[in-house]
Amino acid sequence: MPETTAAFTEHDHAACQSKALAYVIAQCEAKGLRLTEARRRVLEILLESHTALGAYEVLQRLNTEGYSAQPPIAYRALDFLVEHGFVHKVERISAFVACHFPGQCNAPAFLICRSCRSVAETRDARPAEPLSKDAAAMRFAIEDTNVEAEGLCQSCQSEEGA
Amino acid sequence: MPETTAAFTEHDHAACQSKALAYVIAQCEAKGLRLTEARRRVLEILLESHTALGAYEVLQRLNTEGYSAQPPIAYRALDFLVEHGFVHKVERISAFVACHFPGQCNAPAFLICRSCRSVAETRDARPAEPLSKDAAAMRFAIEDTNVEAEGLCQSCQSEEGA
DNA sequence: TCGATATTGTTATAAGATAACATATCAATT
DNA sequence: AATTGATATGTTATCTTATAACAATATCGA
Ligand SMILES: [Zn+2]
Ligand SMILES: [Zn+2]
Ligand SMILES: [Zn+2]
Ligand SMILES: [Zn+2]
């Protein structure tokens, strides 16, 4: 199996999920970050699958659980989680996906299925070489990089052929 | 000079601009595409600088020229230009920038200044290697890739220090 | 000229994101 | 325990980005 999350492969997702959650809890302890109720619930919702969810989908999920939250609740929780690298924003589809490489994720890159919205994360994508070289040459200070590939996962290819 | 557009460097932008426009005109001729008034105006607006413009900024520009257009006018023109590779969408900032590598642009990558919104385009970014390798391994069919780096251009770094 | 196809005009609305401000909670110090 | 500054939440309203839907035109080959 390649160095990707198991998004498009069979795997023990319960383990996948609890490992990531445990890591976030530990990190917050260690760094004195406050993993509040809302933040934790949002993270748990995202960890349920390898599918990216929009902020309003997350919000809806919160609200089907007795919560009665407005957009800023979801966005603030997501901002916190993204800021600390526990969740990634997938710009291409304006959606959020939990990080599944707890603690090992520097420059993530994503494979995004346009049909089922599953997102596989690969790590160690050295920020696209020619880009960082050019950036240095023109004294451009890169702060953050997105590498996102959209397409069809294997199972959605089959369905589309059908 | 590296293989980037001249976005962050001194250059003969008039030439830059007219070369790109001429290329698009020729391509449309050759492929029987209709570069209508609206499409051409939108392209010209984007070619004026290496700054990315939002769809509504483009719309506003159209409307300050006697036009009286609604959002779909701008989006349709942009869709056409993006579809044929004459314009790129910069997902990270939901904005559009003219392609300045007419005919030589396969997998563009961008350096985006978060302050002045200038965008430099580098070509030949082989779609991030680890990603395409992983994709092949899991039979994921990549259709389109974004590589976008956000940061500060040299001149905006100076200003921020001030 | 006819008819299929592509494009534009127009209205309305969906979807994504944030500003602003009041209230509440937390955690460290007196 | 009370004070206080910093952080987080609740709430309303609004802003930005993008598209659906459908009628009216224009284009171009048969
Ligand atoms: Zn999993
Ligand atoms: Zn899929
Ligand atoms: Zn130029
Ligand atoms: Zn700049």
Image: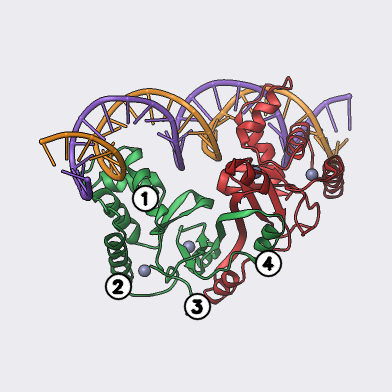
Chain colours: A red, B green, C orange, D purple
Q: Are marks 1 and 3 in contact (CB under 8 Å)?
A: no
Label whose residue precedes the other's in the sequence (1 or 2): 2
Residue B52 pos. (x, y %): 42, 56
Q: Callout 2: helix, strand or loop?
A: helix
C-alpha gap between disc 1 and disc 2: 24 Å
Residue indicated by mark 2? B15
Residue indicated by mark 3? B2
C-alpha gap between disc 4 and disc 2: 35 Å
Residue B101 in sight from this viewpoint: yes
Among all residues in the image, which is located at the extreme bottom? B1
Q: Are marks 2 and 3 in contact (CB under 8 Å)?
A: no
* Label 1 Cα crowd, 10 Å radius (few <14 / some 14-19 / many 20+): some
Query: Quadrant of residue B13 in the image?
Result: bottom left
- Which amino acid type is shown beneath numbered disc 3? Pro
Q: Are marks 1 and 4 in contact (CB under 8 Å)?
A: no
* Beta carbon of the mark 2 residue lies under 8 A of ligand 3: yes
Residue indicated by mark 4? A126
